Image: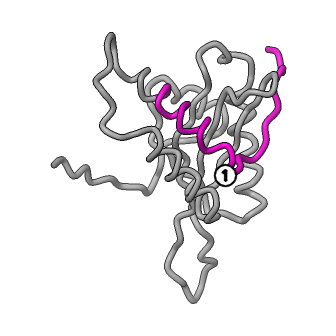
């Protein structure tokens, strides 16, 4: 495993590259020829820029040779005030992606480690994620476990 990358917090100025990587990430979900995007890249860029500027969303990037090659996002989910327990936020982990050419070099693990270090330091209650089949083994190696209490109600429209 090589470590020819650095991990750092994402900045609003990274929004264009992060939007481009988001599009690459979602293209991988489609076999063969992906459909035309329903949204514009510029819309994603604005969305990411606004979220990273607001502080409710955080992200970390892996860089190699000065280029972003991976990212992971964290949305802070507030909890209702509680009189007898801390009401620290929960972290929702999403949009975790490393370029295929940079996988298996430790960048994914390093991104999740940076996110976990932040979550622990910020006193988050825990982290939740809906992993893909491909990413589940990495999440498991990084300490994520099946929930004991979480329930889900899919709302098919």
Which is nearer the eye, 132 or 15?
15
Could you tell me residue 128's position as x and y percent? 52, 50
Which is nearer the eye, 98 or 115?
98
Q: Is residue 34 left or right of residue 45?
A: left
User: Residue 79, relative to residue 73: is it above or below?
Assistant: below
User: Residue 68, relative to residue 116: is it above or below?
Assistant: above
Magenta segment boundaries in residue numbering? 1-25
Which is nearer the eye, 30 or 153?
30
Determine which quarter of the picture holds residue 56. bottom right
Residue under numbered circle 1:
12
Residue extending farthest bottom? 83
Q: Quadrant of the N terminus?
A: top right
Determine which quarter of the picture holds residue 100. top right
Is residue 115 located in the magenta-colored stretch of the structure? no
Determine which quarter of the picture holds residue 112. top right
Is residue 7 located in the magenta-colored stretch of the structure? yes
Q: Is residue 28 left or right of residue 119?
A: left
């Amino acid at each position: 495993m090589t470590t020819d990358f650095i991990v750092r917090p994402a900045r609003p100025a990274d929004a264009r590259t992060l939007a481009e990587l988001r599009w690459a990430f979602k293209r991988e979900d489609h076999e063969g020829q992906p459909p035309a995007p329903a949204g514009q890249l510029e819309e994603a860029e604005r969305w990411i820029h606004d979220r990273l500027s607001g502080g409710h969303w955080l992200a970390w990037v892996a860089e190699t040779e000065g280029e972003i090659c991976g990212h992971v996002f964290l949305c802070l989910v507030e909890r209702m005030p509680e009189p007898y327990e801390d009401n620290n936020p929960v972290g929702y982990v999403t949009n975790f992606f490393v370029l295929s050419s940079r996988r298996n070099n430790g960048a994914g693990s390093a991104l999740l480690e940076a996110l976990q270090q932040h979550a622990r330091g910020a006193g988050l209650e825990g982290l939740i994620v809906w992993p893909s089949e491909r990413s589940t083994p990495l999440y498991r190696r990084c300490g994520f476990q099946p929930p004991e209490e979480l329930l889900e109600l899919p709302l098919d429209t």
